[in-house]
Amino acid sequence: MNSFLKILFLLLGTSICFCLELQIGSPMPRVDHNLVEISGEKITLNDVKGENGTIIIFSCNTCPWVIKWEDRYVSIADRYQKLGIGIIAVNSNTSRFEGEDSLAKMAIHASKNNYNFAYAQDPEAKLAYAFGATKTPHVYLFDDKNALVYRGAIDDNARDEHNVEEEFLINALDQMLAGERIIKSVSKALGCSIKF
């Protein structure tokens, strides 16, 4: 028993997230958890939910994968917000909130990259733990009933958007909005680990 407790305390003391990722069909968790938007205002997932669905992207300021993909956040938001899709980027890098992922630096980053959606910190990473998110970027799409219909990566080519062969998120959005079955509801999230 002592060995078991030692291992348990060792695991609890690490910054690794041993959380289970949300399964397709799961309801959107922690919809009332207060996030801190780059304006300094409190915001919740309930505030950003769209009439026809919601995209939640776990993101940050410095991950090279985010930097390669984030222009696609902007174009997706531009295209789908007018179709009733809410979108938010959530920063759960709690160990960096006093440094490169501070609210001030997030605001500069959002402005520099023309973010046209909410960008917020996740205090104590409660949202990331509830989702089982582990990467930046890590994408979750919910339908109009707040059920998870897609999770994973934005598409299959972070390095070069002109050579994307499969647009995972866009395909899921189009199929969801058309009332069709989502053919690929899960893909592998690629990126930097969330810094809990």
Image (spheres, rainbow, N blue to C red):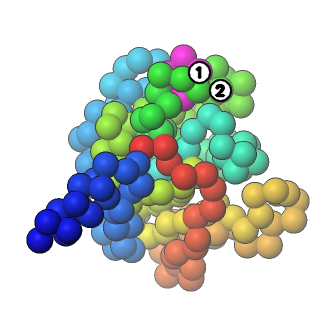
Stretch in magenta: 101-105
What residue sits right under mark 1 in the picture?
105
- The secondary element bearing badge 2 is classed as helix
Q: Residue 97 at x, y = what percent?
A: 46, 27
Residue 151 visible? The answer is: yes
Image side of residue 71 versus residue 20, left or right: right
| Quadrant in which the C terminus is drawn | top left
| Label 2–label 1 contact, CB within 8 A | yes
Of residues 8 and 162, which is closer to you in this image? Answer: 8
Instruction: Give the residue displayed 77% in from the left and 64% down from the top.
Output: 157
Residue 158 drawn at (x, y percent): 75, 58
Describe residue 157's horizontal placement relative to residue 130 as left or right. Answer: right
In this view, the residue in front, 59 or 45, is 59
Instruction: State the residue in front, 152 or 92.
Output: 92
Q: Which mark is residue 109?
A: 2
- In the rendered image, the vertical position of residue 133 relative to residue 102, given as above or below: below
**Secondary structure state at the residue bearing disc 1:** helix
Disc 2/disc 1 C-alpha distance (Å) = 6 Å
Q: Say whether residue 112 is magenta.
A: no
